[in-house]
Amino acid sequence: MSEFDLIRRYFTRATPGALLGVGDDAALLQASEGNVLAVSTDMLVCGTHFLSDADPFLLGHKALAVNLSDLAAMGAAPRWATLAIALPAADEMWLAQFSAGFFALADQHGVELVGGDTTRGPLNLCVSIFGEVPAQQALRRSGAQIGDDIWVSGCLGGAALALAHLQGRIALSEAELAACLPALHQPQPRVALGLVLRGIASSAIDISDGLLADLGHILEASQAGAEIEFAALPVSAVLQACQTPPLIKQLAIRLGHQETMTKSLVMIRGGREGFGVEFFHQLILSGGDDYELCFTAPAAQHAELSNISARLDLPLTRIGKIVAGRGCIVRDASGNPLDIETGGYDHFR
């Protein structure tokens, strides 16, 4: 199968929303009247962002989802995408599954694939996405104001927990892994939320590198500081359950032997004796791959955001506030600042 057969068979579809789609040297796109284009690009590299045996359907989903998440953070409506893909070989079964996963999510959000490139090489996926947003309604990182509330959608830490298992840093049970793998492999971009946050949120960003790192971008752009209440953070249910294994603690208490408790932790929880408070904090605050939205809004919008949460059937949680100064302080239940060592993922550190 030639490069062009591959493109025709797996990546060419009708593009009625574009002036010109796949098949020429460039696509021709035109934003609707009153809108500007929002454009973002993300790359997924085998060995860095996913394992070589990753499910191709889920990989097709994620390749597009991480880009849709960027548009959601801008309050933009998705329209078009391009896909550049390097492949070790033209594996037709793999391509069929990958393209099915990609287009299933594309159809869900009305995205047309209008171009791209294919080449032979180490597996590498690069998607560029184009959306539309009224120029004055685009959500930016620079709009946070002192006194604004800080919010996050969904739950945090599930994807980082699954990744820690796959990297061999911890060992989860089959049930625990099954509960958190979808957060890592099949994130749900919060496009609908981004659209309704226009005119309500003062700033927004998607959480890809970790809450503290990404909130830090808002703080830098807005020249402000933040205070976060750790107890308010919406934590993945499986992560919360893993952090405190009550049955093991009860067993140790009944036997009255600390050594039994330690051995039980190793035996029953898969060698997770190192899964302590610091690791728990790291997964939630710095783990990344959540692809939830972190946004700020005036305190007066609290009731409206509660209504939006109910309409979208999506948890929205107030986790802190914007304050004067620089940087972010995370406080425990007693109001004392936590000592957090790492701020998030960085490809070059």
Image: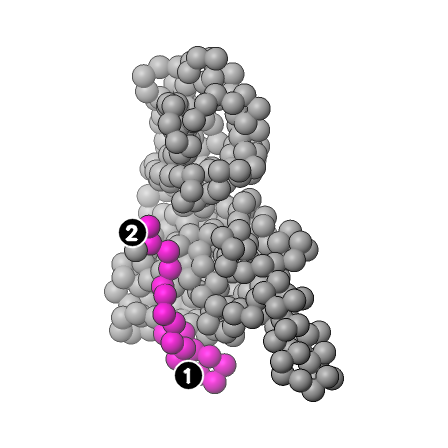
Quadrant in the rendering for residue 155: bottom right
Which comes before the other along the chain, label 2 or label 1?
A: 1
Q: How crowded is mark 1: few (under 14 residues within 10 Å), some or many (20 or more)?
A: few
The residue under the point 57% across, 34% down is 57
Can residue 309 be seen by looking at this rendering? no
Q: Give 268 or 320, whichever is nearer the viewer.
A: 268
Magenta range is 329-348
Residue 329 seen from this side: yes
The label nearer to you, 2 versus 1, is 2
**Looking at the image, is 291 positioned above or below residue 218?**
above
Foreground residue among 272 and 288: 272
Residue 96 circle label: none
**Residue 238 in the figure: left or right of residue 127:** right
In the rendered view, does 68 fall on the left or right side of 107? left
Residue found at x 54% / y 27%: 94
Residue pointed to by mark 1? 336
> Between residues 141 and 185, which one lies in front from this camera angle?
185
Was residue 341 drawn as part of the magenta stretch in this picture?
yes
Which secondary structure dominates the residues rendered in magenta? loop
Residue 170 lies, in percent from the top left, at 54, 60
Residue holding disc 2: 348
Q: What element carries label 1?
A: loop
